[in-house]
Image (cartoon, helix red, strand yellow):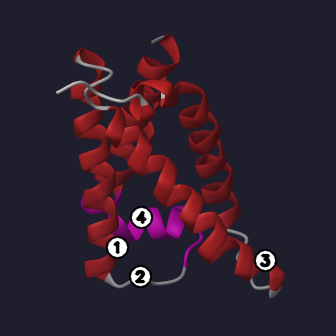
């Protein structure tokens, strides 16, 4: 339970904070991260999703097992990003330097979620 709660707190602070910054000050975030111009709609959607993860993680602190799907979704999309986006860019030699920060942060989430998520509980047969 300690790791589970830690991952909720980590998500509240990092994802929630980043999402808020992306929504409130998108141009500052783009410039701070050294990113190219972003489509404001897509960038805003990403920021909104990060804020949603942060808000739902607050509920996860109260009921850690009930909100495990939040961490599972986070684990899945970050792993898919590595395989479907980052890896092909690395192979083609086109991985942007600003994305290294995202890759490191995503890796910490993947490792933390793998440690925290009670997979035996998730995959256990539930009695109805």
Rendered location of residue 28, percent (x, y): 41, 64
Q: Is residue 105 above or below residue 118?
A: below
Secondary structure, mark 1, is: helix
- Quadrant of the frame with the N terminus: top left
* Residue annotated with mark 2: 38
Q: Earlier in the sequence, mark 1 or mark 3?
A: 1
Secondary structure, mark 4, is: helix
Dominant secondary structure of the residues highlighted in magenta in the image: helix
Between the residue at mark 4 and the residue at mark 2, the CA separation in whole angstroms equals 12 Å
- Quadrant of the frame with the C terminus: top left
Range of residues picked out in magenta: 22-35
Secondary structure, mark 3, is: helix
Q: Earlier in the sequence, mark 4 or mark 1?
A: 4
Rendered location of residue 8, percent (x, y): 39, 28
Q: Nearer the viewer, mark 3 or mark 4?
A: 3
Between the residue at mark 4 and the residue at mark 1, the CA separation in whole angstroms equals 13 Å
Q: Nearer the viewer, mark 2 or mark 3?
A: 3
* Residue annotated with mark 4: 28
- Asked whether the residues under the numbered discs 2 and 1 touch, taking CB atoms below 8 Å apart as contact, a structural biologist would say yes
Residue at the (32%, 78%) spot, across then down: 42
Q: Which mark is residue 43?
A: 1
- Asked whether the residues under the numbered discs 3 and 4 touch, taking CB atoms below 8 Å apart as contact, a structural biologist would say no
Q: Which mark is residue 86?
A: none
Residue at the outermost left position: 128
Query: Would you say 17 lies left or right of 118 here?
Result: left
Q: Quadrant of residue 34?
A: bottom right
Q: Nearer the viewer, mark 1 or mark 3?
A: 3
Q: Is residue 59 above or below residue 78?
A: above
């Amino acid at each position: 339970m300690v790791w589970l709660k830690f991952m909720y707190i980590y998500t509240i602070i990092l994802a929630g904070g980043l999402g808020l910054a992306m929504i409130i000050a998108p141009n500052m975030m783009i410039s701070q991260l050294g990113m190219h111009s972003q489509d404001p709609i897509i960038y805003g959607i990403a920021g909104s999703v990060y804020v949603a993860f942060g808000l739902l993680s607050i509920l996860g602190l109260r009921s850690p097992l009930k909100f495990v799907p939040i961490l599972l979704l986070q684990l899945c999309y970050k792993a898919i990003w590595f395989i479907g986006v980052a890896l092909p860019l690395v192979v083609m030699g086109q991985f942007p330097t600003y994305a290294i920060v995202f890759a490191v942060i995503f890796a910490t989430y993947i490792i933390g979620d793998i440690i925290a998520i009670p997979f035996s509980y998730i995959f256990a047969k539930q009695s109805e």
